[in-house]
Amino acid sequence: MTGSLAIPVGALTGTLSRYFARKVALSILGVILATILLVFVVDFVELLRRAGDARGGGASITAIANLSLHRTPAIIERVLPFATLFGAMGAFVMLSRRLELVVARASGVSAWQFLAPAVAVAIGVGVVSTLAFNPVAARMQDRAERMEARLFSSTGRSSEQARWIRQRSIDGQAVIRANSAASSGVSLNGVTVFSFTPEGQFRERLEARNAKLVDGAWDLDDVRVIAVGREPQSLARYRLPTNLSAAQVRETLGAKSMVGFWDLPGAIALAERAGLSPLRHRLELQELLARPALLTAMVLIAATVALRFFRFGGVARTILGGVGAGFVLYVVTEFADDLGAAGLVNPVAAAWLPAVVGCLVGATVLLHQEDG
């Protein structure tokens, strides 16, 4: 009789693992989809406001919605750790309130066994985010900048995030101002150039619809030339010599978010050949590689506050505790990022240390809760 009622522990563990993994994955996916919808709506409303202020811009609702859709992935990528934290916390809280975790523990399954599927899900989300989502987000962000320039640059309004470039060439110095940049900085929109002689005297001012970096020069389109002692004139094209390379322009503009994961090694090599510091690109590459570990830390932090019996309440306090712990880890990550970008900390340490410390702290707290 006893032998007929026995259930293989391995089969039970495998079934529970798949069940827990599915619950956590669906919860994280639900939070991500809700965040995408929220970000899209808020950004769409803001772009509608900008289009309403930009008289004569001619931006249709369809074009604005398309622009907002292209801008959303880059924002989602930055809030992905919080989406993982909230998704894992929501899954653990629901499993606890339904007493499913109590039943699992009573059947002999330890906390580490049902945490393993959640950690596997976090690692999978991090790998997919790094290898697939980040390159797509980078390309869509680049398209969004070009679309935004076409929709809003014709209004003549100043951009709140104007880009400035200073260069020196055989003809003298020049200061370039652009309302926006695209294609990793080699394409500028809403361009104003202040040109000076080699002696430092003001020569002319150029106003162009856009500029594109080619070999040894900027190609300006639809240019208005305002020179000293001459009447203003309009030209279809104007060629401004430059000694800047594409890598130097990217470094000057700080176009970190425009470079996808698969393009980062090439950007690092190009910056080194150009004699520029590849520190920013190295840091971003290490941050992308460390993303699975960071998401794992978020899951462990969620487990430390959500794996408990909620029969006597305390759900709100638990959720606030998890949000606070995740926010602290996020602040530490951003602080380490600033130190790494400033060159005060090695990029590998700046990217990996917060994630590793977060995993160790979460595991330590869980060990204390489970094993005393």
Image: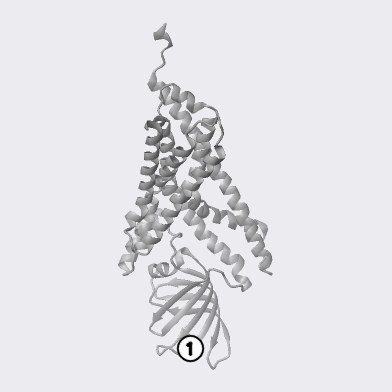
Residue 209 horizontal side relative to residue 288, left or right: right
Spot occupied by residue 238 in the image (x, y as percentages of width and height): 50, 79
* Number of dots carrying numbers: 1
* Image quadrant in which the C terminus is located: top left
Q: Secondary structure at mark 1?
A: strand
Q: Quadrant of residue 184?
A: bottom left
Quadrant in the picture for the N terminus: top left
On the rendered structure, is 334 left or right of 224?
Answer: left
Q: Is residue 294 above or below residue 173?
A: above
Location of residue 152 (image quadrant): bottom right
Query: What amino acid type should be assigned to the residue bearing mark 1?
Result: Arg
Foreground residue among 151 and 356 = 356
Q: Where residue 241 appears, x then y in whole percent?
A: 42, 79
Q: Image point 53% across, 38% down: which residue? A: 90
Residue 253 visible from this viewpoint: yes
Q: Report which residue position mark 1 lands on.
A: 203
x 58%, y 90%: residue: 231
